[in-house]
Image: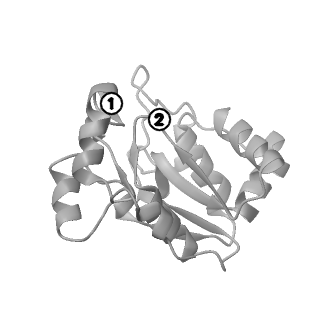
Amino acid sequence: MKTKIYFSTAVAIWDADFYVKVDDDVHVNLGMLITTLARYRTKPRVYIGCMKSDQVLSQKGVRYHEPEFWKFGEEGNKYFRHATGQIYAISKDLAAYISINAPILHRFANEDVSLGSWLIGLEVEHVDDKTMCCGTPPDCEWKTQAGNVCIASFDWTCSGICKSVERMKDVHNNCGEGDGAVWNVVL
């Protein structure tokens, strides 16, 4: 499972306050990300992302079919809150917990749901930050013009930026925080 391997490897190689998982087809404003993470540095167990709770998919043959749907109660129930997989951050203690317990952490059909399940029974602060799931222009562009720069922008229909190779520069030009922003972050 990629998530277990990623966090186990990251914790073994880097000593960091937070570990961030981000898809390669998502536009990220690093200055905004750093500023947001800095607000939670004093908290030991934090899970930051754009939280959601979708229906458990019990029907075979659909994407993200959950073979263990029965564990979530009655048919039609929703998953517990978890961050969307495009981008999220977890604190050092949580990444270490995943690394140490990787062999016994249960995996569901969806990796984002799996991560949420590993944290649901722990004393964790779940931060639902909608700036981590802005749409691409014009959505993020309007927010930037209003002074509400997004941490991350992507297209929900593609689970990332549609045609990201062709569009990433345009998204950055319209929704970016400015060239010097990352260097002006106060920690």
Of residue 88 and residue 123, the one placed in the foreground of this image is: 88
Q: Is residue 64 left or right of residue 101?
A: left
Q: Residue at x 30, y 46 (%)?
A: 172
Q: Is residue 9 left or right of residue 174?
A: right
Q: Tag on residue 24?
A: 2
User: Which element is circle 2 on?
Assistant: loop
How many labels sit on residues? 2
Dots 2, 1 in contact, CB < 8 A: yes
Q: Is residue 67 above or below residue 75?
A: above
Percent of width and height locating residue 123: 68, 72
Q: Residue at x 42, y 36 (%)?
A: 57
Percent of width and height locating residue 113: 54, 46
Q: Residue at x 31, y 32 (%)?
A: 158
Of residue 135 and residue 99, the one placed in the foreground of this image is: 135
Outermost residue to the bottom? 42
Percent of width and height locating residue 174: 21, 50
Q: Tag on residue 61?
A: none
| Crowd around label 1: few <14 · some 14–19 · many ≥20 (10 Å) | some
The residue type indicated by label 2 comes to Asp
Q: Tag on residue 164?
A: 1
Q: Residue at x 55, y 68 (%)?
A: 37
Quadrant containing the C terminus is bottom right
